[in-house]
Image (cartoon, rainbow, N blue to C red):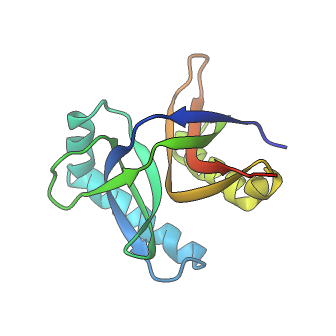
Amino acid sequence: MSNYSIKTILDNYKMTAFGVSFEDFNDWAGNAAKTAARKAEITENGKLAELLALADGQEYQINYVLDGKAWRGFGVMGEFDVEGAVVLDFLAGDYLVVSGTGADKDHLADGITGKVFGGMLQEITDYKYVGPGNSTFVKAAENGGFYGEMWLRAQKVED
């Protein structure tokens, strides 16, 4: 079983991000292409850099349910008024925190996401993921390489 911990967030918080909605959640290749195109767009036009400068500089990959559709984006912790960005609500409560390390920054967040949704959530029996979203960050590790964490709001399963 993969390692995870439970951390409690006492206050609701917001994240501001740019992203894309998916018409078909199961179109993995198409959704990956849409996500990559959106990331390239906000990197090239400076919108992501603008958000990072307003916040603490830490970028997050965010999965969310927005207007009843699966949505994936890139953003920051906090609420900021930036044209074209959405502000997402994350609720106080318990969060499953799944960490990982790797040599490739660009693929670590997707690797952790794949591990979590590719079977790990089914292995965890004492908590269930309740959403409405999750976020993953990756940063340089002190010993070289990269370290990342995915945070998913969860609820303790009652016996």
Q: Nearer the viewer, residue 43 or 67?
A: 67
Quarter of the picture containing the N terminus is top right
Q: Judge whether residue 145 can be spotted in this image.
A: yes
Please state if 150 lies on the left or on the right of 119 as rendered. Answer: left
On the image, the x and y values in percent for residue 45 come to 20, 55
Q: Nearer the viewer, residue 17 or 134?
A: 134
Residue visible at 36% across and 53% down?
89
Residue extending farthest to the bottom is 23
On the image, the x and y values in percent for residue 64 come to 46, 61
Asked if residue 52 is positioned above or below residue 62 in the image, the reply reads above
Q: Judge whether residue 102 can be spotted in this image.
A: no
Q: Which of 70 and 11 is in front in this view?
A: 11
Give the number of marks: 0
Asked if residue 73 is positioned above or below residue 94 in the image, the reply reads below
On the image, the x and y values in percent for residue 31 come to 50, 72
On the image, the x and y values in percent for residue 18 come to 30, 58
Residue extending farthest to the front is 159
Please state if 19 lies on the left or on the right of 110 as rendered. Answer: left
Residue visible at 73% across and 55% down?
121
Asked if residue 151 is positioned above or below residue 125 in the image, the reply reads above
Q: Nearer the viewer, residue 118 or 45?
A: 118
Residue visible at 58% across and 58% down?
130
Q: Based on the displayed image, in which of its 4 quarters is residue 67 positioned?
A: bottom left
Residue extending farthest to the top is 142
Asked if residue 32 is positioned above or below residue 73 in the image, the reply reads below
Q: Based on the displayed image, in which of its 4 quarters is residue 144 positioned?
A: top right
Residue visible at 46% across and 82% down?
23
